[in-house]
Image: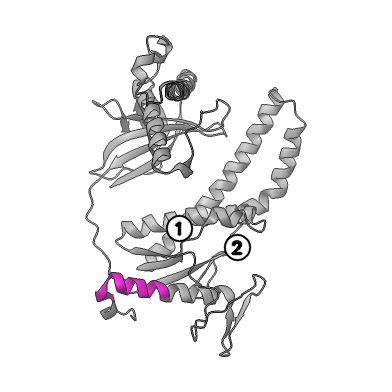
Amino acid sequence: MNKGFKFRLYPSAEQRILLAKTFGCCRFIFNRMLADKKAFFELTGKMLYCYPSQYKNEFPWLREVDSLALVGAYNGLRSAYNNFFRDKKTGFPKFKSKHRGHNSYTTNLINGNIELSDGFLKLPKLGIMKIKQHRQIPDGYKLKSVTVSLVPSGKYYASILYEYEVAIKPVVPMTILGLDFSMSELYMDSNGDKPGYPHPYRKAQKKLAREQRILSKRKKGGTNYRKQKLKISKLHEHIANQRKDFLHKRSRQIANAYDAVSIEDLNMKGMSQALNFGKSVSDNGWGAFTRMLEYKLTDQGKQIVKLDKWYPSSKMCFNCGIIKSELALSERKYRCECGYTCDRDLNAALNIREEGKRLLCLKTPTVGHTGIAC
């Protein structure tokens, strides 16, 4: 299995200059190869096979940076092409912009050119850099590659990828939790509990709007404009860190407490575009939460069950199973003809849990003898 560790980098002034050159060269080689491929295809109708080494004679300054970083840019372009021809919905590869706030490149371990030890990271061409290593790498982990990135707030990070062998023992599910997506509270679980989501974006929205109004009055490209833009970038980063911190802690609590989790496989992009829910859906981070929950459960040999997005969890009565033909979004209480009354989200969470149990029984026939009713 592969696992990445992200650490803060503290490059020197000279190393920052070389990092900027590396980001620029990777962007240039990506755009140049993409332009050549497009021109060759329009001229001949055939695919052009080109590599970064072919451009070094024409552009000798490409030799100043790590050659493996240029190979990483080539691999990114190749993946973009493969994704496009496999699924046209992904879109044709686009040119990289110089003014995009996030820059990164990836280099691979070859002949000991990368080394992490005692709070320092050694990288090709850059040499040794100070790093904030806030956690130790377990024994037996084999270093594979490093991705160096510069975020809009001006901070440098190194994402170090390791390969390791682990024998994950499957856990027979004895306890299962159902989670129903909630616009206001992230989710409602089948126990009737809500996580108390802090809504970091909504709380910072007024401050963010004020800083953006100030930015709109600055002259674009000026010193004050760059300072104000950096201030806004730091505020956005703070909001994102608050959200990730909460989602990581909550997903860890659930993964440790339950053997299986049942959720709906929702189309969050479509939901954000419907009924002006964009800000609420984006602020919740439900997609990031489910991804965190999935890999944390998998690491422990546990399971996550994803139901079809058309499963009528909200319209179905948990007590008798009757499905309503219509259920307005404004109806927060579920009332059934059988007399059953329940909170709308709790009723859906209970239905999701029971459907998850059913699917687990089909997937693992022995589950029925371990406590889950099949």
From the viewer's side, name the closer residue of 141 and 189.
189
Which residue occupies 66% across, 59% down?
A: 275
State left or right for residue 30 relative to residue 151: left
The mark tally for this picture is: 2
Residue 215: x percent and y percent? 72, 34
Above or below, 326 against 280 in this view is: below
Most common secondary structure along the magenta stretch: helix
Distance between mark 1 and mark 2 Cα atoms: 15 Å
Which residue occupies 50% across, 85% down?
A: 319
Highlighted range, magenta: 355-367
Above or below, 350 against 83 in this view is: below
Residue 303: x percent and y percent? 34, 64
Residue 183, numbered label: 2
Residue carrying label 1: 290
> Disc 1 marks which amino acid?
Thr
Residue 183 picture quarter: bottom right
> Disc 2 marks which amino acid?
Met
Determine if residue 105 is in view.
yes
Above or below, 152 against 205 in this view is: above
Of the two numbered discs 1 and 2 on the same chain, state the one appearing first in sequence. Answer: 2
